[in-house]
Amino acid sequence: MDDRNFRTGDAKTVVFGSDAMLKSSPVETIPEGPTTPEIAYQMVKDETFAQTQPRLNLATFVTTYMDEYATKLMNDAIDINYIDETEYPRIAVMSGKCINIIANLWNSPEKNTYKTGALGIGSSEACMLGGVAAWLRWRKKRQTAGLPFDKPNFVISSGFQVVWEKFSQLWQVEMRQVPLTLEKNTLDPEETLKYCDENTICVVAIEGVTWTGLNDDVEALDKALDAYNAKTGYDISIHVDAASGGFILPFLNPEVKWDFRLKWVYSINVSGHKYGLVYPGLGWVVWKDKQYLPAEMSFSVNYLGAEITQVGLNFSRPAAQILGQYYQFIRLGFQGYKEIQYNSMEVAKYLHKEIGAMQPFMNYSDDVVNPLFIWYMKPDVAKTANWTLYDLQDKLSQNGWMVPAYTLPANLESYVVMRIVVRQGFSRDMADMLLGDIRSAVEELNQLAYPTNSKIAQDKNQKIASTIFNHGSYAKK
C-alpha cells in the first residue's frame, strides 16, 4: 500500500513520521499548502524548546506564573478586542473597576464614581500617557500666559527605564538626567531642583528602579518641590513611575508616603504584568483627579457601532489581561497579594544575604526594598580574577538560569553588575538551587589559568577609559 498520504499531513499522519519534519521551517515564504494543527503546533513548539524556561528567567520582571483558572479565563477572552466597548461593555466596566481598585491602593482623593485612569499595553505606554499629560498641561498654561512653549523638559535620575528616552525623542521633550553615584544611589531631591526651571513639565520619580531595584524618596522630593514652587511661582508636578513598586509598597509598606497623599504627585503608572501578577502585556496609569488629564488626550470614533472614547497610544488591545487582573484582585484580595509579595521579598532578602556573603561579591545596597537587587565583584577581586560577571552569566545559563550582567548607567558605567528579580513562582528551594549553581560556577571560574575573552575586553576598556581620563578632557587640572 502506498504510504505517501500518511506522510503529507492528514488525520492519520504521525507527527514525527511526516514529510514536514524532514524540512526546515519556513523563513522567507509561506508554505504552499496547509498542514495538520498537530504538526504545525509541534514545529512552532520545537523552535522555542531550547530557550530558558520562563520561571528560571531571573532577568525578566514580567509574570511567569498564574494559576490554571486565571490562565483558562484569559484563554477564554483571547479573541476579544477590548476597544470595541459596544460589543463587550462588561469588560469596559471591569477595566474601570480595576482602575478604581488601583487608585484607592494609592490613596486617591478623587470623589468620582470611577477614578481617572487608563489602560496600557504595559507600563511603558502608561509612562508615555503620564508624560504626555504633564507636557500638555504645561503647554496650555504657557500658551494662556502668552509665554514660549517650545523648550519643554522633564527631570529624572540617570537610572531611568528606556521608555523615558523614547518619550523624550518622540515628543521632543528634553530629558535632564540627575546623575547617580554610589553614595547617592537614588534621585537626590535638592540636586533635582538644580535641573528644574520654568520649562520643566514634571519630575519623574521611580519606585523600583530597573537598574538597581531601589526607590526614589518621593516624600522628600515632594517637600523640596513644594518649597521650590512656592519660591518660583512654578507648579512643577511629580509623575511616579511605579512600574514595579506600585504593587509592592501598598501591601508591604503602606506607611510610606509616595503616592496621592503627596501634594505634587499628579499621576502614577504601574505594570499589571509585573507585580500586578498578570501575564504580559498590561499597564495602568492613574491621575489624582480628572482635571489633570487633558481633554485632548481622549479620542473618539464611531465606526465600531457607537461613539467610543479612548485614552491611549494603542487602539486595538487584548481584553484577556483585564480579566486576568480583575481575577487576581478577586482571587487574592489584599491579604493574598500581601502574602505573595512578602514571600518574594523574603526570598530576595535571602539571596541578597547569601550572595553578599560570597567572597568575590559585594551588594550594591544594604537594603532590599523591592524583590530585586544587584551586586558586583569586589574591586580587588575584579582586578585579579581571570573572569568577569559576564562569564558567570554564561555559566549559569548552561544550567537554564538567566541572570543578567550589565553595566550601570552614566556616571557609574565602570561597574558591571548582576541582577536577580524574584517573582511569584520562585521558591526558597529554587533559590537554594540557584545559589548552589552560583557557588559551583565561581569555583570553576576561579580555577582558570588564563583570562577569559570578556576579562581581556574589560581590562582593555578600562585601560582606554583611564587613559582618556588622565590625558584627555577629563584630566585633573
Image (cartoon, rainbow, N blue to C red):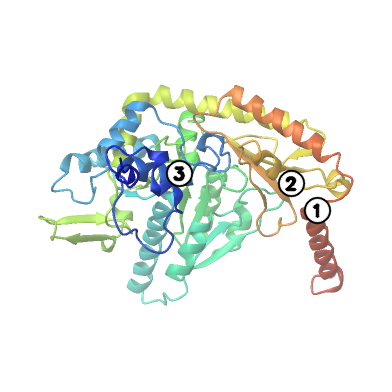
Q: Which residue is mark 1?
A: 455
Left or right: 476 in relation to 372: right
Residue at mark 1 to residue at mark 3: CA–CA distance: 47 Å
Indicate which disc, 1 or 3, sits on the residue closer to the N terminus: 3
Residue at mark 2 to residue at mark 3: CA–CA distance: 45 Å
**Residue 279, position as x, y percentages in the image:** 40, 39
Who is closer to the viewer here, 445 or 363? 445
**Residue 326, position as x, y percentages in the image:** 30, 34
Residue at mark 2 to residue at mark 1: CA–CA distance: 9 Å
Give the amino acid type for the residue marked by disc 3 in the picture. Answer: Leu
Vertical arrangement, residue 21 with respect to residue 440, above or below:
below
Left or right: 150 in relation to 256: left
Mark number displayed over residue 185: none
Secondary element at tag 2: helix
Q: Which residue is mark 3?
A: 262
Who is closer to the viewer here, 58 or 203? 58
Local crowd at mark 2 within 10 Å, few (<14), some, or many (≥20)? some
Give the amino acid type for the residue marked by disc 1 in the picture. Answer: Lys
